Amino acid sequence: MASFETINYSLRPSKSVQRGLIFDGLKSLSMEMELHDLVYIGFGSIWFTDFIKAHKYLNIDDMVSIESDEIGFRRAEFNKIYRTITLKHGFSGEILPELLEIDNLRARPWIVWLDYDNALDESVVEDIQWLVVNAPRNSILMFTFSANVSAYGRLKHRPERIQTLLGSVVPDDLPKEACDTATLPLTLSKYVMDFLASEVADAARPGGFVRAFKVPYADSASMVTVGGILPTNDTVAVARDVVAREKWGCILDEMIQAPQMTLKEIATLQAEMPCVENLSRERIQEIGFDLKENQIRSFQRFYKYLPSFAEVVS
């Protein structure tokens, strides 16, 4: 079953936080690196949530959405939100090389966000390898995949599976403790990022690779987003400077786990923001409800990105 049939990708709170952080980062990079005439490439599905942000936040008009599911492709055609979105029917490994053959695409920087709903596997690795070699200069690449442990085999076999996928960047003695439910997302984040850097180095791209995105998150499933920039010699210093700033929010060493909250709870706590010190549990209890400490810290850190949805009854 296609994932669009089971998940509305616009409604998950942790995904909304992840998306907000990433597009804040993309906006900073595009402005500071003076990237113009960008092309956005991704999996729009039938919702096109990321494409809306790419158009509104980054002023990108030309966008390409790849959809492999036949019914999903038909529905995407019906739900396409902007006339400048080009829909491509097929798998990313087939479509990406075709895009490089289009005159008005191959010489422009790409923002590629391949937001897979499946686990890291050989096809994902092949997409990564193709893009780091062939994406136009000053492109930004991001890859999202599942970090659910069940997709990587039994615990004792997971280190071997990760090494099979990513090769020599994974140590031979990777302990199985690095691959359990709690640790696997960050382990995958680290080694896929190392793999990206290694592949770019092997390709000898001018400007190299700037690590920029490491965003693990969990709603109903554990997911990981990693990626970075393929700058030129002229833009590499700017890219590194942007990512090195204290306010850069797209490299995280912990999972985003946004609390499930009602609209009333969110609105009430937002009225307390921003606050200089940590919001206390006692203060929330004074207001009239309660949250766990980890939920409070998550809210305070990510409240700007939490979604607000309500059912409208006519």
Image (spheres, helix red, strand yellow):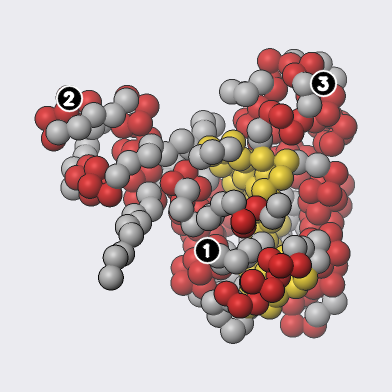
Q: Secondary structure at mark 2?
A: helix
User: Is residue 211 visible to us here?
Assistant: no
In the image, residue 13 above or below residue 173: below
- Counting other residues with Cα less than 10 Å from the Cα at mark 1, is it few (<14), some (14-19), or many (20 or more)? some
Tell me the kind of residue under disc 1: Thr
User: Is residue 247 visible to us here?
Assistant: yes
Spatial distance from mark 3 to mark 1, Cα to Cα? Answer: 36 Å
Q: Position of residue 3 (x, y in %)?
A: 65, 53
Residue at 74 percent of width and 33 percent of height: 151
Q: Secondary structure at mark 3?
A: helix
- Counting other residues with Cα less than 10 Å from the Cα at mark 3, is it few (<14), some (14-19), or many (20 or more)? few
**Which residue is the site of mark 1?**
49
What's the mark number on residue 157?
3
Q: Secondary structure at mark 1?
A: helix
In this rendering, position of residue 312 left or right of residue 62 = left
- Counting other residues with Cα less than 10 Å from the Cα at mark 2, is it few (<14), some (14-19), or many (20 or more)? few
Spatial distance from mark 2 to mark 1, Cα to Cα? Answer: 37 Å
In this rendering, position of residue 204 left or right of residue 308 = right
Q: Position of residue 290 (x, y in %)?
A: 23, 29
Q: Position of residue 39 (x, y in %)?
A: 65, 72
Residue at 16 percent of width and 28 percent of height: 285
Tell me the kind of residue under disc 3: His
Q: Position of residue 56 (x, y in %)?
A: 46, 72
Contact flag, marks 3 and 1 (Cβ < 8 Å)? no
Location of the C terminus (image quadrant):
bottom left
Tell me the kind of residue under disc 2: Glu
In the image, residue 231 above or below residue 250: below
The residue lying toward the viewer, choosing from 154 and 295, is 154
Contact flag, marks 2 and 3 (Cβ < 8 Å)? no
